[in-house]
Image: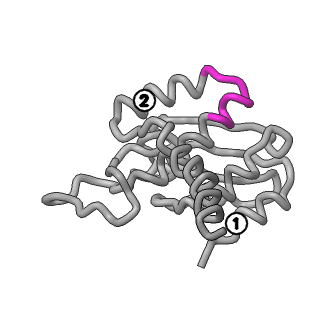
Amino acid sequence: MKKLIIALTLLFINPLFSQEEEFKFIDTKEQNDQWNIKFKTENLEQQIKLIQERLISDSNIFYTPTNAHGETQLPDGFKSTTQHRPLYILKSQNSEGILLESNISKKRVALINSHLIENNIENISLSNDMKSQSLYGARAKSGLIIINFSDEKVLEKLATKEK
C-alpha cells in the first residue's frame, strides 16, 4: 500500500516540477527585448499566457538590480540571475497599484496566475520608455507591465503578501 501511495504521489508531483522546466528562461537583455516585442503584438488572451509563463520563469531566476561587485551568490531555489525583468504593477480602476516584488515566490506566482484570466482583466499595457523609468526607476528599465483588473475584489486577494 505504501508503495502505491508513493508511486501515485510521484506521478502527480513530477508534472508540477517538469511544467516549470518547459518555460524558457529570459535572463539577457536581448531575450527580454524579444519578449517585449512579441508581447506587444499579441491579443489579450495571448498576453495573459505570456505573462503567466514569464512569471513562472522569473520565479526561477534571481533578480539583481545592478552589476554586483564580484560574483553574485545564487540563493537556494534559483537557477540563474538576471538584471532584465519587467516591473509588474497590478491595479484596478479605483485602487492604487500593487508593485510585485523583484524575486517573487513560486507560491505567489501560482496565486497570481490563478487570477490571470480574461474575464478578470480589463487590459494590459507594456511600456519600456524613459517616462516609465523616470517614474519607477531602474526596476522599469526592462519594461513596465500594468495589469488592470476589472474587479477590485480580485486585486484585494492578490494584495495579500505571504508571511
- Residue 124 in the image, given as x and y percentages of width and height: 69, 38
Mark 2 — residue? 33
Quadrant of residue 97 in the image?
bottom right
Pick the residue in front: 163 or 130: 163
**Label 2–label 1 contact, CB within 8 A:** no
Count the marks: how many? 2
Residue furthest to the front in view is 1
- Residue 63 in the image, given as x and y percentages of width and height: 38, 55
Residue drawn at 42 percent across, 29 percent down? 33
Amino acid of disc 2: Asp
Range of the magenta residues? 41-49
Principal SS element in the magenta part? helix
As drawn, 25 above or below 68:
above
Residue drawn at 38 percent across, 57 percent down? 78
Q: Mark 2 vs mark 1: which is more N-terminal?
A: 2
Q: Is residue 63 magenta?
A: no
Structure colour scheme: one colour
SS at badge 2: helix
Can residue 99 be seen here? The reply is no
Residue furthest to the bottom in view is 163
As drawn, 163 above or below 13:
below
SS at badge 1: helix
Look at the image and tell me in which quarter the C terminus lies: bottom right
Residue drawn at 40 percent across, 62 percent down? 77
Look at the image and tell me in which quarter the N terminus lies: bottom right
Q: Residues within 10 Å of mark 2 (few under 14, many from 20)?
A: some
- Residue 162 in the image, given as x and y percentages of width and height: 62, 73
Amino acid of disc 1: Ala
- Residue 120 in the image, given as x and y percentages of width and height: 82, 46
Say left or right for 73 vs 152.
Answer: left
Mark 1 — residue? 159
